[in-house]
Image: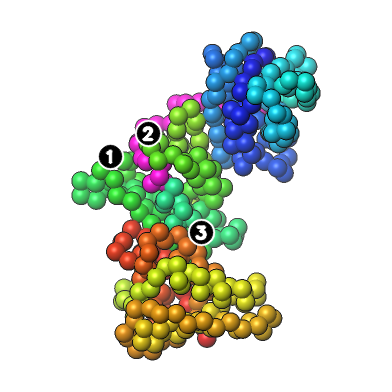
């Protein structure tokens, strides 16, 4: 097997696999990427048996073949090479030689026999167009609320729904860790698949989807088939195994009664909360928000660190209210909002609060208060 390829192209291709290949595994072959030649291109494949990435790259093919090789090591080699072109050659004993200018690397590979079979295209089903920027926005606005508790498997990902809204298609992502819930949706004119029961995309797979669609405002293709969701872009296919579990009924969490409403400038409050966050620690990360007429007072007291206070102007005309929240949860919810103004519906007593952009109903974050 032998080919020549541009260094930048090869580096980009291997780098995309690094988040997928297993670092600790009982199957050493999963530390490797599979490289296979085709006419005028190579395929680079990575899998951890739950996620599969298959990507095509232009190359000058000398002889056909395939090999698997350590993803991490070959990435480090290509990264340090300074030439513009790399000559790749593997012999019958599965040793790979990388040559560029006067640099020569030799590294052992493994035959493809033990590499999981990933080339069955019959399981892709029908794929639907969606703008990459839409997927990127949904992931950005919902994923921060995913649970990190491995015991709650059904919450270790985002819930993805798709259906019709009149003549349009509506796509929604929901994530919760039991203390907060983030929900974002987009509406498209194009026809999209309908997922009546929704699917749960796991955290690691969602991260790979995000990397794939990042910076791609144009159409990508999305489908669901045989317990996997499939994303296709130009020359790349990503398959992610879904979580086989029931997602909780998130509609029950949405407050039926609106709390007292305060409007504020996003950046002003975001910076004020960051000042409160300086006092936070793993043991304590609470902030008390006290609302009076056109004023928001913030107070964070941490016995291990110290105390912080701040006061900012807001649009508020209701009764005086004091509520405690996890300051990190407030920061996460406001940080993903792009709009300049934010609406905060503060629940009374121990009822949850709702944060959303002013004039935009396509995102909300529900946060449970702390006892103060």
Query: Which residue is denoted by mark 2 in the rendering?
Result: 127
Q: CA distance from mark 2 to mark 1?
A: 11 Å
Return the residue nearer the eye: 50 or 272: 272
Q: CA distance from mark 2 to mark 3?
A: 27 Å
Q: Determine whether, in the image, residue 73 is placed left or right of residue 239.
A: right
* Residue with the most extreme top position: 63
At 47% across and 82% down in the image, what residue appears? 311
Q: Is residue 108 above or below residue 18?
A: above
Return the residue nearer the eye: 20 or 134: 134
- Residue mark closest to the camera, 3 vs 1: 3
Instruction: Estimate the x, y position of residue 361 in percent, counting from the top left.
Output: 31, 61
At 50% across and 35% down in the image, what residue appears? 238
Q: Secondary structure at mark 2?
A: loop
Query: Which residue is denoted by mark 3 in the rendering?
Result: 144
The span picked out in magenta is: 115-135
Query: Which residue is denoted by mark 1 in the rendering?
Result: 191
């Amino acid at each position: 097997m032998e080919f020549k390829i541009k260094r930048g192209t090869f580096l980009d291709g291997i780098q995309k696999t690094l988040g997928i290949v297993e670092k600790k595994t009982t199957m050493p072959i999963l530390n490797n990427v599979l490289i296979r030649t085709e006419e005028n291109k190579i395929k680079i494949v990575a899998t951890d048996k739950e996620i599969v990435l298959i990507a095509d790259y232009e190359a000058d093919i000398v002889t056909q073949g395939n090999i698997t090789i350590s993803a991490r090591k070959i990435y480090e080699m290509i990264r340090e090479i300074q030439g513009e072109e790399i000559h790749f050659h593997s012999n019958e004993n599965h040793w790979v030689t990388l040559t560029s200018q006067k640099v020569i690397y030799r590294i052992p590979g493994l035959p493809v026999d033990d590499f999981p079979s990933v080339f069955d295209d019959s399981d892709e089903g029908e794929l639907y167009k969606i703008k990459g920027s839409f997927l990127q926005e949904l992931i950005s606005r919902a994923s921060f609320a995913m649970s990190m508790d491995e015991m709650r498997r059904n919450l270790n990902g985002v819930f993805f729904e798709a259906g019709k809204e009149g003549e349009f298609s509506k796509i929604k992502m929901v994530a919760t860790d039991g203390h907060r819930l983030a929900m974002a949706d987009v509406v498209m004119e194009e026809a999209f698949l309908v997922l009546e029961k929704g699917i749960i995309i796991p955290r690691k797979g969602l991260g790979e989807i995000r990397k794939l669609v990042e910076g791609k405002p144009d159409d990508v293709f999305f489908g669901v088939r045989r317990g996997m969701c499939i994303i296709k872009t130009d020359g790349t296919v990503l398959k992610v195994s879904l979580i086989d579990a029931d997602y909780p009924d998130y509609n029950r969490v949405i407050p039926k009664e609106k709390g007292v409403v305060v409007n504020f400038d996003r950046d002003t409050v975001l910076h004020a909360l960051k000042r409160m966050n300086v006092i936070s620690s793993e043991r304590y990360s609470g902030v008390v928000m006290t609302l009076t007429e056109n004023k928001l007072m913030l107070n964070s007291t941490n016995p291990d660190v110290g105390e912080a206070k701040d006061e900012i102007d807001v649009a508020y005309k209701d009764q005086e209210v004091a509520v405690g929240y996890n300051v990190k949860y407030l920061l996460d919810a406001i940080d993903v909002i792009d709009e300049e103004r934010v609406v905060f519906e503060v629940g009374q007593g121990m009822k949850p609060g709702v944060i959303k952009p002013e004039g935009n109903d396509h995102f909300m974050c529900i946060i449970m208060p702390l006892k103060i």
